[in-house]
Structures are given as structure tokens and as C-alpha cells.
Image (cartoon, helix red, strand yellow):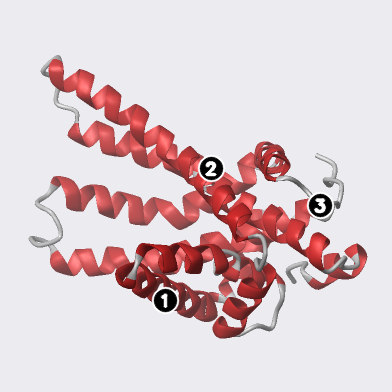
Amino acid sequence: MAAPALRPLSTGEVLDVSFGLYRSLFFTLVVVTTVSRLVPTVLGIYLNVSGGVLEHWVLGIVQFLVSIILGALGVAATTFIVSGAYLGQEISAEAALHAAWGLIGRLILLSLMTSLVIGVGVVLLIVPGVILLSGLLLSTVALVLEQPLTATGAMSRSWELTRGFRGKALLTLLVAALLLLIPTMIVGVLAGIATLLGIPSQLLVQVLAGVLQIFVYPFMYVALTVLYYDLRVRKEGFDLELLATATQPA
């Protein structure tokens, strides 16, 4: 796929460009997602069918920590790959994962900090939580593509970049999240049918849901990366050639 035209995009165009990139990068993105989500998914399925976290609390902690570490790695690697394609470059899954690993400490810290801030906002009132979510949505993308940034610097960068466009950012996230929910909903319907027919389906349902989410999970971060570039084009008019050089993984 040729690099998308670098111009301001409507929300529909952001999603359309994201689908195009997702299709063209499908194999590479699935490799990254499999590396980052397979182990946490398998551990989660095992916990669910063997008594739950309370019965296997040590494994539950391990699954939680592995999910955070590998999840951060996968998000960053996906961002590198999509950014490269958006700027007309090809970045392999191996190169993207290697570059992402170099940021793992800051990525984990950023994930914990944004979760805490947004969580506090939701607890205080739903509306502040939504505002914080939409304002901090591009923190990880900024941390990955604008090195060197600290976790707090990435949060500030996202907050400024989304100013005036937080409704658009939230809508993009909601549509991408809906795509993630569709496979789960389909599997849920199939599980209900299987139950009515008296067919044991708990394990099969969880495996199918996990596999389907591996395939669709990258789309959310494709969309956020496209949104990041859209806002930079709108607000900063950055130099394409300079940015392409600056964001290419070593």
C-alpha cells in the first residue's frame, strides 16, 4: 500500500485510512499481536476454566504482570509499524519489537500512570474520566514516536495535541473499540446457541474469542497512530521527510 496522502482527515477518513493500513499490514501486525497477547490469553483461559484467580492467585499475578509487559511491547511495536507505513517505509515485526523493547520501562510507567489518572477521574465523576481518557489517548503514540519523552512528557504532549479535537479522538476510540467487541459478541451468540443445544462450550468459546481478538486487536492502535498524524498535520504542519527519519526504529 502506498503511503496515505498527508492531509487533514475527517473522522470517517481517519477510520478509512486505518482500515487500509490494517489490511495492508495484516500479517506483520498479527505477528506482533501474537507475540504480545498469546501467552496472557492462554494464561487467562486456563485461569477461567480451572477455578479462577482466587484459587490460583499466584498465577493470576503472573498473568497480570505478563499482560502489562507484553501489552506495552505490542502497542509500541504496532505503532512503529503503522507509523513507518504511513510515512512510506516498511518496518518488520522483528525490528519493531526490538525498538519497542528499548522503551519498555517508560511504556509500563506510562500505562500505569494514565490508568491511575483516568481511573481517579472516573471515580470522581464519569465526565472528568471521559475528558481525561480522550485527552491522554495519544500518550503512548507520542512516547513511541517522539523520543526521548518521559511518561509525564508524553501525557502532556497528548493533552496538548488533542486540545480542540477530543471529541474526535473519543469517537475514533469508540469505533475502534466496537470492532474489538464484535468478535466477542459473535462468539457469545454462538455460545448461547450451543448451550441451548446442550453442547459444552465454555473452553471453546474462550479460545475462539482469544483467537479472534488477536486478529482485530491491532486496529485500535492503527487508528490512534493515524489520528496522531492527522492532528500533527492540522496543528503543526510537520516536515514529512524529517519526521520519517526521526521515527524509524534502529
- Quadrant for residue 121, please give it: bottom left
Please tell me which residue is depicted at 21% across the width and 24% down the height of the picture: 192
* Quadrant in the picture for the C terminus: bottom right
Q: Which of 112 and 163 lies nearest the eye of the viewer?
A: 163
- Can you tell which quarter of the image residue 153 is in? bottom right
- Pointer 1 with pointer 3, Cβ within 8 A: no
Judging from the image, what secondary structure is the residue with disc 2 in? helix
Which x, y percent locates residue 17? 73, 42
Residue type pointed to by label 3: Pro
Q: Is residue 99 above or below residue 233?
A: below
Q: Amino acid at mark 2?
A: Val
Which type of secondary structure does the marked residue at label 1 adopt?
A: helix
Residue ID for mark 1: 117
**In the image, is 69 to the left or to the right of 84?**
left
Q: Is residue 234 left or right of residue 225?
A: right
Point out the tag, 2 or 1, that comes first from the N-terminus. 1
Q: To which residue does mark 3 refer?
A: 8
Residue 111 appears in the picture as rendered: yes
User: 213 or 11: which is nearer to us?
Assistant: 11
Pinpoint residue 118: horizontal percent, then vertical percent.
41, 70
Per the image, the residue denoted by label 2 is 175
Estimate the x, y position of residue 20 in percent, counting from the top left. Answer: 71, 37
Q: How busy is the neighbourhood of tag 2: few (under 14 within 10 Å), some, or many (20 plus)?
A: some
Q: Which kind of residue does numbered mark 1 sit on?
A: Val
Where residue 176 is drawn, which disc sits there? Answer: none
Residue 53 screen position, x and y as percent: 15, 60
Cα gap from disc 1 to disc 3, whole angstroms: 30 Å
Q: Looking at the image, is mark 3 or mark 2 earlier in the sequence?
A: 3
Q: Residue at x 80, y 66 (%)?
A: 235
Question: In whole angstroms, how far apart are the C-alphas of marks 2 and 1?
Answer: 23 Å
